[in-house]
Image (tube, helix red, strand yellow):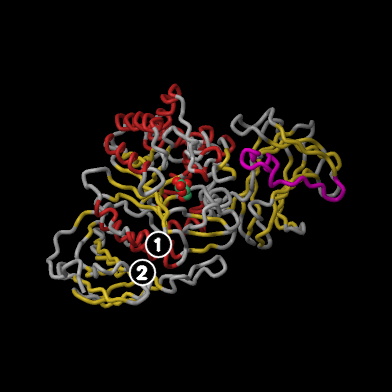
């Protein structure tokens, strides 16, 4: 057996590695935001769905006009006097004969509304009374058979748009409730932004996040969160680029738009909510802004390689640069500054301490891209040298855009470059040394999107092996995030994801467990030559880091092979290793995966471990083991 590393060597001091290595990447793909992490329960609450989102959608999609008990009236979608010009569509309901029940509309949310008996739900809506006399309204949560689970009543009292709010407490739990709004007296009214939230959002934030999903992300203790995409950022054509200013302020004033992944963005989960979430879970925010070019796959050129990149006209660039600079002021400026005041008005007078900004997302490296990136980057650097800008290098780990992107970034001295790749497990296993070979004098790397194609244990273990290489190269790999993060049942555009969910259930993939284990066991210093691995064995990988705060030494041992294997560990260079250590193991059938119905086929187990300065560990076949040892 040939050992790649000598166990006899005395330890050096170790190598400092990035304190921000493992984080998350959130993109609104697979219904991750509306219908997902964003806790809003009404779908198309503002009547802004349109055929631009999907050919068969319109402002009344996911709503039903209802005339129970032989009532009648009419309904229209109008635009002539909206709550706000950013939110042009609303409905006008005319109740002519209301019978015993009323005339109105019904919304069944995103595949049904889940409510729990005894819990509180906040309902709100904007109403404008259009007839002379007040109109009585009954708002209820109902089962598919029409049983009323909770109800609130009020009368209109304004001929201008007015917001009405109430709390509903259902008497029964169901996952298929509808929200019903009925006019129970005759008259005519306009209705818009009909919203229903559980009161129990993550940290009880208003306009907040679905508590169970947000908690799973918080449990990972990510060092950063990149948002809001992905391809979503540069968008399907220039008009679809994600413009952060459209996503802040009162929800009724946000500019909704098509989602490049084939649905709609209410943008209720906007920049304020992203920053707030980051702060709530102790993660650094990493917003990504378009580099003033649209996605190269714009206009349906996705499958044929894409030539659809469009660039903002030069005469619009000054305003665009200002938009980028304004974000930094919005995030970090004092509450007395123009944009800091908007953050304060939203309830956050203190700065958000923004440190990173991504410019561009795996854009095609054209001269249009380069010109625009350069002027944005130069402007940010000049005004905000404290901000670290992250550049981009195309969608693949090699090839033309990758080469050009890196050359361009290095020529500009961009400090960090974002790489993306989705690969087979075998590719990851054969490229464990990818970053060992990178030039240490060039930009650092943010591996912003990566995954092996699949959610089986063998995929997750290949990712674990690869992540030991990221740790080993944590001197130049500044950050890394698996992608995509969330995927909703029946609404999935990208089939390999970290967490699957529906309105009730959650499935944590083996890939999630690997990410979480690495994230919870990050270190500040990397030690080489601790674990002896056979250099001819391409199925094993290992790393050793120390966490400065606790002093703990953390070993990660990966066996992607079909047989268990012995790994020799030499910790003689450390002054003290406390023998009572903690072991986490993820192991099993390589082909096994978790599903929404069977979410616990592959789960980590934990146990005590007897550590010493020198020991041999038998890593089970297809496994990740983490041994965490105290030094004091
Ligand atoms: O993660 C899914 C997509 O993959 C992202 O939107 C894009 O950046 C990449 O191509």
Is residue 472 depicted above or below 306 in this figure?
below
Q: Is residue 619 visible?
A: yes
Task: Categorize mark 2 by other alpha carbons within 10 Å: few (<14), some (14-19), many (20+).
Answer: many
Is residue 575 depicted above or below 192 in this figure?
below
In this view, the residue farthest toward the top is 315
Question: Is 129 displayed left or right of 23 in the figure?
Answer: right
Q: Give percent across and percent down for residue 14.
A: 18, 59
Q: Give percent across and percent down for residue 2.
A: 20, 71
Residue pointed to by mark 2: 560
Q: Is mark 1 within 8 Å of ligand 1?
A: no
Closest to the observer: 550 or 588? 588
Which mark, residue 425?
1
Discs 2, 1 touching: Cβ within 8 Å: yes
- Is label 2 in a helix, a strand or a loop? loop
Question: Is 6 displayed left or right of 127 in the figure?
Answer: left
Question: Is 627 displayed left or right of 593 in the figure?
Answer: left
Question: What residue appears at the point 47 percent right and 35 percent down from the top-left corner?
Answer: 309
User: Magenta includes 256?
Assistant: no
Based on the displayed image, in which of its 4 quarters is residue 414 positioned?
A: top left
Closest to the observer: 423 or 276? 423
Which mark, residue 539?
none
Question: Is 297 displayed left or right of 220 in the figure?
Answer: right
Based on the displayed image, in which of its 4 quarters is residue 92 positioned?
A: top right
- Is label 1 in a helix, a strand or a loop? helix
Q: Give percent across and percent down for residue 382.
A: 29, 29
What residue span does the magenta drawing correspond to? 48-71
């Amino acid at each position: 057996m040939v050992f790649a590393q000598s166990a006899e060597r005395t330890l050096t001091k170790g190598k400092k590695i990035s304190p921000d290595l493992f984080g998350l990447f959130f993109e609104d793909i697979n219904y991750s935001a509306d219908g997902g992490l964003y806790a809003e329960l009404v779908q198309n609450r503002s009547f802004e769905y349109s055929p631009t989102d999907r050919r068969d959608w319109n402002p009344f999609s996911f709503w039903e006009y209802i005339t129970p008990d032989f009532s009648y009236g009419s309904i229209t979608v109008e635009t002539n006097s909206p709550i706000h010009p950013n939110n042009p569509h609303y409905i006008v309901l005319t109740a002519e004969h209301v019978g015993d029940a009323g005339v109105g509309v019904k919304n069944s949310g995103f595949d049904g509304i889940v409510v729990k008996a005894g819990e509180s739900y906040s309902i709100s809506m904007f109403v404008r009374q259009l007839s002379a006399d007040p109109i009585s309204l009954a708002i209820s949560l109902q089962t598919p058979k029409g049983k009323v689970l909770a109800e609130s009543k009020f009368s209109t009292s304004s001929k201008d748009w007015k917001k009405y709010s109430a709390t509903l407490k259902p008497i029964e739990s169901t996952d298929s409730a509808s929200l019903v709004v009925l006019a129970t007296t005759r008259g005519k009214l306009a209705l818009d932004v009909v919203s229903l939230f559980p009161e129990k959002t993550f940290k009880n934030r208003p306009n907040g996040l679905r508590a169970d999903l947000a908690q799973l992300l918080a449990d990972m203790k990510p060092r950063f969160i990149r948002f809001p995409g992905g391809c979503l950022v540069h968008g399907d054509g220039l008009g679809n680029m994600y413009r952060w200013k459209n996503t802040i302020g009162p929800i009724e004033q946000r500019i909704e738009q098509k989602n490049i992944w084939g649905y709609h963005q209410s943008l209720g989960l906007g920049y304020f909510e992203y920053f707030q979430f980051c702060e709530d879970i102790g993660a650094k925010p990493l917003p990504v802004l378009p580099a003033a070019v649209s996605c190269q796959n714009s206009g349906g050129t996705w499958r044929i390689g894409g030539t659809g990149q469009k660039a903002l006209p030069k005469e619009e660039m000054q305003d665009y640069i200002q938009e980028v600079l304004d974000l930094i002021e919005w995030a970090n400026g004092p509450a007395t500054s123009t944009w800091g005041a908007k953050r304060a008005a939203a309830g956050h007078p203190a700065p958000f301490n923004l440190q990173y900004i991504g410019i561009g997302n795996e854009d095609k490296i054209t001269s249009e891209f380069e010109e625009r990136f350069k002027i944005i980057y130069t402007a940010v650097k000049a005004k905000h040298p404290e901000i670290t800008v992250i550049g981009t290098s195309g969608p693949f780990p090699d090839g033309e855009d990758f080469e050009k992107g890196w050359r361009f970034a290095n020529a500009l001295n961009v400090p960090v470059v974002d790489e993306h790749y989705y690969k087979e497990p075998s590719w990851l296993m054969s490229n464990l040394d990818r970053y060992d070979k990178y030039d240490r004098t060039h930009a650092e790397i943010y591996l912003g999107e990566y995954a092996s194609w699949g959610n089986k244990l063998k995929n997750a273990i290949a990712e674990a092996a690869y992540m030991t290489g990221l740790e080993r190269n944590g001197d130049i790999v500044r950050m890394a995030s698996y992608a995509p993060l969330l995927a909703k049942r029946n609404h999935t555009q990208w089939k390999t994801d970290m967490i699957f969910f529906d309105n009730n259930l959650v499935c944590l993939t083996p890939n999630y467990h690997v990410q979480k284990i690495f994230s919870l066991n990050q270190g500040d210093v990397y030690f080489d030559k601790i674990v002896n691995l056979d250099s001819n064995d391409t199925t094993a990988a290992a790393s050793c880091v120390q966490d400065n705060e606790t002093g703990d030494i953390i070993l990660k041992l990966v066996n992607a092979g079909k047989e268990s294997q012995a790994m020799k560990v030499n910790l003689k260079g450390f002054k003290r290793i406390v023998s009572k250590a903690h072991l986490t193991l993820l192991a099993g059938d390589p082909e096994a995966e978790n599903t929404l119905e069977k979410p616990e086929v592959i789960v980590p187990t934990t146990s005590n471990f007897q550590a010493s300065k020198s020991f041999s560990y038998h890593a089970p076949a297809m496994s990740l083991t983490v041994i965490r040892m105290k030094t004091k």
